[in-house]
Amino acid sequence: MNNRPSGNNRPDHGVRPGHNGGNVNNRPSGNNRPDHGVRPGQNNFGPGHAHRPDNRPGYRPGAHRPSHVGHRPTHIPHFAGWHRPAPPRHWRPAPNWRPFRSILGITLGTGFNISLNFLNNNGYNVNYYGDNTIYLRDVSMLNMLWPDAVLYYNNGGGLCGSRFVYSSGYYDMNRYNMAYASLSNTYGMPASIQNTSSGVEVTWWGVNNQFVRLSYESNYAQNGSLNYYTTLSFGV
């Protein structure tokens, strides 16, 4: 494909979506490392100065849980709910793991309605909510802007996970490389690095059932378009 990055811009484990392989143990270089104004492990995963106020007439949920509002975005794959991955056998938390207590400023376990109020009142662009999910547009994480983000809530209503999604119509691992360098700088080597049928996926596990997962894969969006997706997940 056009605009395919050279070998220097790809992680050293050299995984290309669409090519199968075994486990990979090499760590990428520190090139393209972003500024670290916001790092996983800090208490506040706030978006810094990337707030984009939503000036639409906003729904403010009351005592009852809201139903579907807006339209689920179709330019990204459909993520079927939240599933915590199983850690590998005999794993140990990263020695420098700093537990995170919130995502985008929302404390883990916070209820759905309270989260919506917080997001609407703090300038976030809420694109859709329903089915234990809240979809956002243009959110900052790891000092980078992610066009799409999803917050997940368990059956008890508490915040339990998140996904931040960056998509491209052509092969380009620059966003993945930057996120990997930032996370490795904070947590060290991931507990697992493995090829998937369409890309690569790495995961760090920490204390209190917390984990961070980063992947780069080709996939079809709900509208049928084939894209390349860098997906960053935090959860418990």
Image: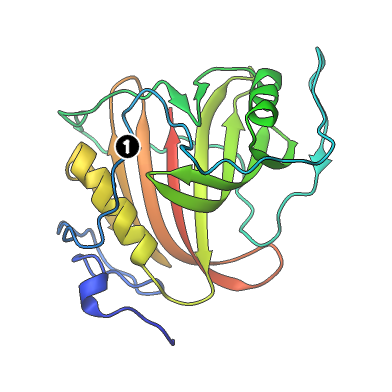
Residue 222 appears anywhere in the view: yes
Among the 4 quarters of the image, the one containing residue 183: top left
- SS of the residue under disc 1: loop
Among the 4 quarters of the image, the one containing residue 157: top right
User: The N terminus is located in which quarter?
Assistant: bottom left
Instruction: Examine the rendered structure and indicate whether residue 68 appears above or below residue 8.
Output: above
Indicate the position of residue 56 as horizontal and vertical percent values.
81, 41
The structure residue drawn at horizontal position 48% and vertical position 37%, both measured from the top left corner, is 47
Extreme residue in the top direction: 63
Looking at the rendered structure, the kind of residue marked 1 is: Arg
The structure residue drawn at horizontal position 40% and vertical position 72%, both measured from the top left corner, is 172
The structure residue drawn at horizontal position 61% and vertical position 40%, both measured from the top left corner, is 81
Indicate the position of residue 94 as horizontal and vertical percent values.
19, 32
Extreme residue in the bottom direction: 2
Which of the two residues, 46 or 21, is positioned nearer the viewer here? Answer: 46
Instruction: Examine the rendered structure and indicate whether residue 5 appears above or below residue 84.
Output: below
Q: Name the residue under label 1.
A: 39
Residue 200 appears anywhere in the view: no
Left or right position of 113 against 7: right
The structure residue drawn at horizontal position 29% and vertical position 48%, both measured from the top left corner, is 35
Left or right position of 34 against 74: left
User: The C terminus is located in which quarter?
Assistant: top left
Count residues near mark 1 (Cα–Cα under 10 Å), then give few for <14, some for 14-19, many for 20+.
Answer: many
Instruction: Examine the rendered structure and indicate whether residue 128 appears above or below residue 112.
Output: below
Indicate the position of residue 96 as horizontal and vertical percent values.
17, 29
